[in-house]
Amino acid sequence: MESQRQQKISGVLQEDLADVLQGSATAGGLKGVLISVTKVHVTADLSVAKVYISIFPNDKAKELFQGIKSNTPLIRHELAQRTKNQLRRMPQLEFFIDDSLEYIDGIDKSLKRNENPIENRDLLDKRKKS
């Protein structure tokens, strides 16, 4: 169970991170790429923030995700500048790909084909654990 403080910090980080990531993608000349921060979990001691991101279109996701991970210190610094009045210490950022939309889309497609993914589990890819 997250404390109210954790929830508040998660919300602030989620909003500002979305701005930072989308802004740097646009500034980097990537038109038509949508980067959204689907959720942020902050540890109880507020030292680590696990950030789940979704990237559309999917074919650019792997490359962009690597770019985000390699630029984590810069992203953290930019975030610290934005939240300096709200947070004393910026948590370490850990990024993860949120594949839940992809997974839902797979279920949706298999249901439209009138094949039952519950009876035939090979229709859906195995869900990645994060």
Image: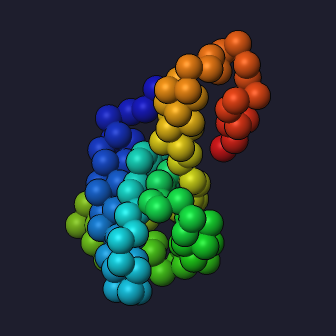
Q: What residue appears at the point 38 percent right and 64 percent down from the top-left corner?
A: 34
Q: What residue appears at the point 57 percent right and 76 percent down from the top-left corner?
A: 67
Compare residues 79 and 71 and report the one nearer the observer: 71
Q: What residue appears at the point 48 percent right and 42 percent down from the top-left corner?
A: 101
Q: Position of residue 127 (x, y in %)?
A: 68, 36
* One can see residue 117 in this view: yes
Q: Position of residue 107 (x, y in %)?
A: 55, 29
Which of the 4 image quarters holds residue 82? bottom left
Horizontal arrangement in the rendering, residue 87 relative to residue 97 (left or right) = left
Image color mode: rainbow
Q: Position of residue 47 (x, y in %)?
A: 52, 55
In the image, residue 122 above or below residue 70: above
Q: What residue appears at the point 47 percent right and 54 percent down from the top-left corner?
A: 54
**Which residue in the rendered view is the most extreme toward the front?**
113
Q: Position of residue 116 (x, y in %)?
A: 62, 17
* One can see residue 79 in this view: no
Q: Which quarter of the figure is the C terminus placed in?
A: top right
**Which residue in the rendered view is the most extreme toward the left?**
85
Tell me how many marks there are.
Answer: 0
In the image, residue 76 above or below residue 6: below
Horizontal arrangement in the rendering, residue 92 relative to residue 6 (left or right) = right
In the image, residue 3 above or below residue 91: above
**Which residue in the rendered view is the most extreme toward the top?**
119
Compare residues 6 and 71 and report the one nearer the observer: 71
